[in-house]
Image: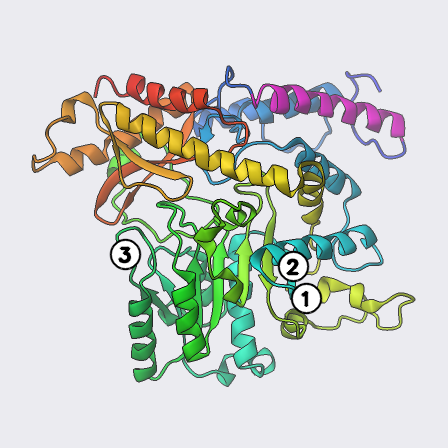
Amino acid sequence: MADSQPLLSLDGDPVAAEALLQDVFGIVVDEVIRKGTSASEKVCEWKEPEELKQLLDLELRHEGESQEQILEHCRAVIRYSVKTCHPRFFNQLFSGLDPHALAGRIVTESLNTSQYTYEIAPVFVLMEEEVLKKLRALVGWSSGDGVFCPGGSISNMYAVNLARYQRYPDCKQRGLRALPPLALFTSKECHYSIKKGAAFLGLGTDSVRVVKADERGKMIPEDLERQISLAKAEGAVPFLVSATSGTTVLGAFDPLEAIADVCQHHGLWLHVDVSWDGPKNGVGWAKAKAHIAPSAPQAAWGGSVLLSQTHRHLLAGIQRADSVAWNPHKLLSTGLQCSALLLRDTSNLLKRCHGSQASYLFQQDKFYDVALDTGDKVVQCGRRVDCLKLWLMWKAQGEQGLQRRVDQAFALARYLVEELKKREGFELVMEPEFVNVCFWFVPPSLRGKKGSPDYSERLSKVAPILKERMVRKGSMMIGYQPHGTRSNFFRMVVANPALTRADVDFLLNELERLGQDL
């Protein structure tokens, strides 16, 4: 097919289809994999929305376009997208590019199957169970259940729904009228999906009781006990506690053993959230000055610490949980999305809670073991395959290689902390225990003025200004946020397996360059 001819359809033309895909893969390898992971290239090519609309030619027309135009659209999409695999993308809790995991994603997308029956996904049904079994073993369970979910937020919502169903199974048929007023408990550092889940499931956000956290962001077990007693006194029925392991901002790990003791005493479901995506910050000083919202509660992402013999003590007690949400697409760089909900339950609770026995899909008279049709465990019908990328990466790296990846992140976080302490103008928010390093950059005009009445207000404006400058320049991306009474500070996430000390040095040098006139 000539490039000048409209690309009306490639149906029935395998040669043309293959040629197109070869060209697209070539663009991806060059622009995303090669350039997108190079420190000499920009993290992003920032454009204002109206300008970007024109550059992308987003209009969908009646007539089809030529192959040459289609390839140019692919190049433009890549050019103006943020390169999250770039070694200087520090903005979210996911970053980096693992080639084996990417290979798994390519295979998955190409096969385009759904993870609901053995009939159409035989390899992936068996593979998912093997991967979940391995993850459960790392938690400390020799048996159990689980499923891959479309993100950690959904994993958390599933846990709330399962805990409610276990306590009041009639609610599946009779709905909310079968329930007394319920109460669930989580810390003020929790993920916002807990409240969203309560609203979505009809419990209401008022059912979420917020437990105090200490100065490091850890849930206080004594206040949990107090809140449970208070809820009971008010006529509510406590049913779940959601603990956090590796909070998004400060990287705090809730004391799971003590929390598990409280849950055991009161007969409550213990869910451990180790799976969050990270906050998204806009750019622009004007927007930053208008931002006066308090820091929203955030959630955990520390599940991959279980792979490290050196650091897994941070999750001591996790084996006592009833459910765990874990996102390997964070610290392990498996690629979005890869979120596992793990259960200690062996009573087929997932299927009992969510199953509808659709006769057109889950026929009971199939020629194979219908227990392999796992799709009735979930609320979705169609479900993408998320296990292959993690399985293929694990096959290539081995548990030993993945442990090195986690330990390297801790080592680089420690290097950043030590370098921060050597430089004038940098101040730690607190000593980190995880790979979140939170700090202020104090520009020359504010140094030595910490006692002035407007110091906090002026310092709060620094991070948004520097964020805008770095994004417009395309040199790097790093998140910032306020937290409680603390002014805006940077939160450096050490997660990309390609990250080096040179990239850490660049981060600090670049902040000094960008802020030298402030």
Lower position in the chain sequence, tag 2 or tag 1: 2
Q: Is residue 66 visible?
A: no
| Disc with the residue nearer the chain's start (3 vs 1) | 3
Task: Tell me the magenta residue range.
Answer: 13-37
Q: Is residue 23 rendered to the left or right of residue 30?
A: right
Marks 2 and 1, how far apart at CA: 8 Å
**Which of label 3 and label 1 is nearer to you?**
3
Q: Quadrant of the N terminus?
A: top right
Is 307 a magenta residue? Answer: no
**Residue that badge 1 annotates:** 377
- Coordinates of residue 277 in the picture (x, y in percent): 48, 46
Residue at the disc numbered 2: 147
Q: Quadrant of the C terminus?
A: top left
Provide the major secondary structure of the magenta segment.
helix
Q: Which residue is mark 3?
A: 214
Which residue type carries mark 2? Answer: Val
